Image (tube, rainbow, N blue to C red):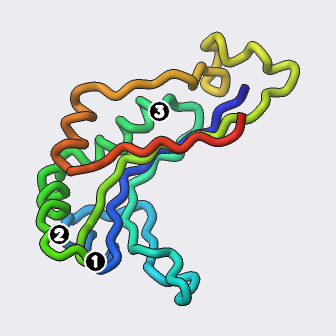
């Protein structure tokens, strides 16, 4: 089985734009989404989004999370204050999430055992992962949820 995966931290809001979030946090995102930029009836996407992303292949989820957190840890308290302060009115809320996205694809016949042994970066075992106390503390400080999406099989 072959695994393709990426990790991102996102802030989402129906009212606060990614540009406003960037100005408040002082961190440039890797990706942004604009509410209603694809369709207005119904509104798609439904919210603005601000993302810091690691799509580097052949890293474990732990390593991808570390890359994202390396950029965000210095501002974790500002992110937390932004999210906590936005809860005054329901329509102005900013939600935060650490997202893990994984795609499982059948391996070619000659690759069937390749991920069981660390040989090259392309052949690493990417199946297991964990979150350490530092990551859990970051999630708490930023009021973030953890969402894991897995596809294929």
Residue 73, image x, y percentages: 21, 44
**Of the pair 89 and 122, the residue shown nearer to us:** 89
Which residue occupies 72% across, 16% down? 114
What crowding class fits label 3: few (fewer than 14 Cα within 10 Å), some (14-19), or many (20 or more)?
many
Instruction: Kindly indicate whether the residue at mark 1 contacts the one at mark 2 (C-beta within 8 angstroms).
Output: yes
Which residue occupies 70% across, 39% down? 152
In the depicted structure, whether residue 62 falls above or below residue 100: above
Q: Residue furthest top?
A: 117
Residue named by callout 1: 16
Q: Quadrant of the N terminus?
A: top right
Q: Secondary structure at mark 2?
A: helix
Residue named by callout 3: 61
How many numbered callouts?
A: 3
Give left or right: position of 81 versus 146: left
Label 2 – label 3 distance at C-alpha: 30 Å
Give left or right: position of 137 versus 38: left
Which of discs 2 and 1 lies nearer the camera? The answer is: 2
Which badge, 2 or 1, is on the more N-terminal residue? 1
Which of discs 1 and 3 lies nearer the camera? The answer is: 1
Label 2 – label 1 distance at C-alpha: 9 Å
Q: Secondary structure at mark 3?
A: helix
Q: Secondary structure at mark 1?
A: loop
What crowding class fits label 1: few (fewer than 14 Cα within 10 Å), some (14-19), or many (20 or more)?
some
Which badge, 2 or 3, is on the more N-terminal residue? 3
In the depicted structure, whether residue 139 falls above or below residue 3: below
Which residue occupies 67% across, 18% down? 115
Residue 24, image x, y percentages: 18, 70
Residue named by callout 2: 86
Q: Quadrant of the C terminus?
A: top right
């Amino acid at each position: 089985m072959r695994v393709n995966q990426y990790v991102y931290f996102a802030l989402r809001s129906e009212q606060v734009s990614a540009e406003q979030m960037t100005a408040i946090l002082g961190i440039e995102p890797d990706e942004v989404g604009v509410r209603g930029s694809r369709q207005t009836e119904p509104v798609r996407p439904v919210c603005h989004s601000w993302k810091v992303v690691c799509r580097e292949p052949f890293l474990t989820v732990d390593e991808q999370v570390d890359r994202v957190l390396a950029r965000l840890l210095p501002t974790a308290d500002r992110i937390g204050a932004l999210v906590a302060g936005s809860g005054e009115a329901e329509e102005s809320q900013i939600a935060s999430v650490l997202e893990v996205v994984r795609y499982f694809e059948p391996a070619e016949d000659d690759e069937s055992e390749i991920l069981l042994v660390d040989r090259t970066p392309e052949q690493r075992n990417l199946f297991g992962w964990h979150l350490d106390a530092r990551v859990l503390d970051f999630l708490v400080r930023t009021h973030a949820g953890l969402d894991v999406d897995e596809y294929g099989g």
